[in-house]
Amino acid sequence: QEHQATLYHLAGTFVLIGGLITMFHMRQHMENMHVSSVQRKILAILAMSPIYSLTSFLSLVFPSMSEKLSIIKDCYEAYVIY
């Protein structure tokens, strides 16, 4: 039980760190929006990191929801590729 709580804390910490770094880079792109058609795609790609990490973390904590969370992740990936 304690080992599992440690895993949740460690995974949650990396989700937060990754999300903060990604938000910093997204803010930089929005402040320096020179080629908006290209940078919108870049922002969509950058948003993949927090979406992937958050859905993976929630799948770790709530294994019964992993299929539904996987659908969210796959739909966003399809949007970014399109």
Image (cartoon, rainbow, N blue to C red):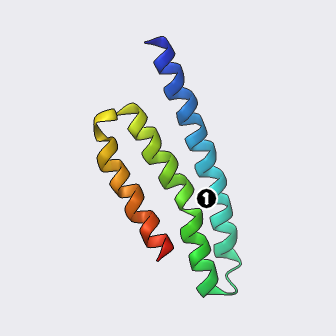
Q: Is residue 71 left or right of residue 54?
A: left
Label 1: which residue? 23
At label 1, which amino acid type do we have? Answer: Met
Q: Is residue 61 left or right of residue 16?
A: left
Mark 1: few/some/many CA within 10 Å (<14, 14-19, 20+): some
Residue appearing at x 62%, y 85% in the figure: 36
- State the image quarter where residue 14 is shown: top right
Q: Secondary structure at mark 1?
A: helix
- State the image quarter where residue 79 is shown: bottom left
Residue appearing at x 53%, y 20% in the figure: 6
23 or 10, which lies in front?
10
Question: Is residue 16 positioned above or below 6 on the image?
Answer: below
69 or 20, which lies in front?
69
Question: Is residue 24 positioned above or below 56 on the image?
Answer: below
- For the N terminus, the image quarter is top left
User: Measured from the top left, where is residue 61 in percent x and y?
Assistant: 39, 32
User: Measured from the top left, where is residue 77 in percent x and y?
Assistant: 46, 64
Residue appearing at x 34%, y 34% in the figure: 62
Q: Is residue 31 left or right of residue 66?
A: right
User: Measured from the top left, where is residue 10 in percent x and y?
Assistant: 58, 29
Residue appearing at x 50%, y 15% in the figure: 3
